[in-house]
Image (spheres, coloured by chain):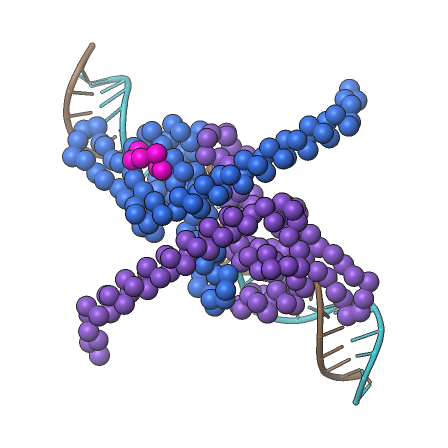
Chain colours: A blue, B purple, C brown, D cyan
Amino acid sequence: MKRSQFDCAPGCPVELTLGLIDGKWKGVILYHLQDGPLRFGELRRRLPGITQRMLTKQLRALEQDALISRAVFAEVPPRVEYALSPSGHSLRPVIDALKAWGESHRDASQREARAAAAAAPAIS
Amino acid sequence: MKRSQFDCAPGCPVELTLGLIDGKWKGVILYHLQDGPLRFGELRRRLPGITQRMLTKQLRALEQDALISRAVFAEVPPRVEYALSPSGHSLRPVIDALKAWGESHRDASQREARAAAAAAPAIS
DNA sequence: GCCTATAGTGCCCAAATGGATACTATTGGA
DNA sequence: TCCAATAGTATCCATTTGGGCACTATAGGC
């Protein structure tokens, strides 16, 4: 979701970036495209739970924002490849940082959950 | 907006992190709190265009997700301080990366806009 | 009493988001 | 003809998001 324009104060580049990558599935789409160009179906297989509808929608949005490119090949069955644009490639440090934090946060949450389970024996 | 649970595939930590920081104003709030604890009014002054309503709402959400803490002092007028939690502090590399990318993207966009303006003289 | 400072809360609403469901188009093979 | 592969599109809907607007509470000063 691109944020509606608002006065630019010191932190607003943060919001600018977030506004381009924050729709559900966008982050993980960008993550997978870092490995190289992928087709629609391959992306779908890598993203359990996503609907065609949502994949199409988010890919179109990312393309609109010039973060990815879409190449249509004159073939049947249809063949369309999606790849990071140069701008999208430059997002690598962002995606890496998001992934690293998410992993550590997940691990910390699991440690907490385990500690809570150990402190409260089952009542059943 | 915390993303609804979905099957965890390799990239999902990216989505996990984004889900915690992607509401409008959250990124820039976190950015400002990196300087140290701030009060509601000070935050508001640093964020031109934000309403009380939105500031309160996003602060509450960030607190709910344990990214920030809220300290109430027994004073009149009311004094409440918001600060990054340890978890919130660990988001620094994320915020920095988002900011860096946003700045370079903004600069690139301005260069493009300038080039377009130079190529298309005013018609009026 | 009124105003100021501070930090909110309640209610309402338009727009955006995420998604379910059904359907579409082109070939080639059985 | 039917089915498979591929990559969508159209329509509808429930929920969420961002925000406008009005009001609240506690003291202290004029």
**Is A123 located above or below residue B18 in the figure?**
above
- Left or right placement of residue A26 versus residue B20 in this view: left
Measured as percent of width and height from the top left, residue B65 is found at 63, 45
Please give the name of the residue rendered at 29% of the width and 63% of the height, measured from the top-left corner: B111
For the question of whether residue A61 can be seen, the reply is no
Quadrant where the C terminus of chain A is found in the figure: top right
Please give the name of the residue rendered at 21% of the width and 28% of the height, measured from the top-left corner: A77
Please give the name of the residue rendered at 50% of the width and 29% of the height, measured from the top-left corner: B7
Closer-to-camera residue (B119/D4): B119
- Left or right placement of residue A113 versus residue C15 in this view: right
**Is B4 located above or below residue A7 in the figure?**
above
Closer-to-camera residue (C15/B52): B52
Q: Which stretch appears magenta?
A: A33-38
Instruction: Determine which quarter of the picture holds residue A40.
Output: top left
Decide whether residue B112 is among the magenta residues.
no
Q: Is the magenta stretch mostly helix, strand or loop?
A: loop
Measured as percent of width and height from the top left, residue D22 is found at 66, 71
Measured as percent of width and height from the top left, residue B56 is found at 64, 59
Decide whether residue A36 is among the magenta residues.
yes
**Is A105 located above or below residue A87 in the figure?**
above
For the question of whether residue A31 can be seen, the reply is yes
**Is B107 located above or below residue B118 in the figure?**
above
Please give the name of the residue rendered at 77% of the width and 22% of the height, measured from the top-left corner: A122
Measured as percent of width and height from the top left, residue A112 is found at 68, 33
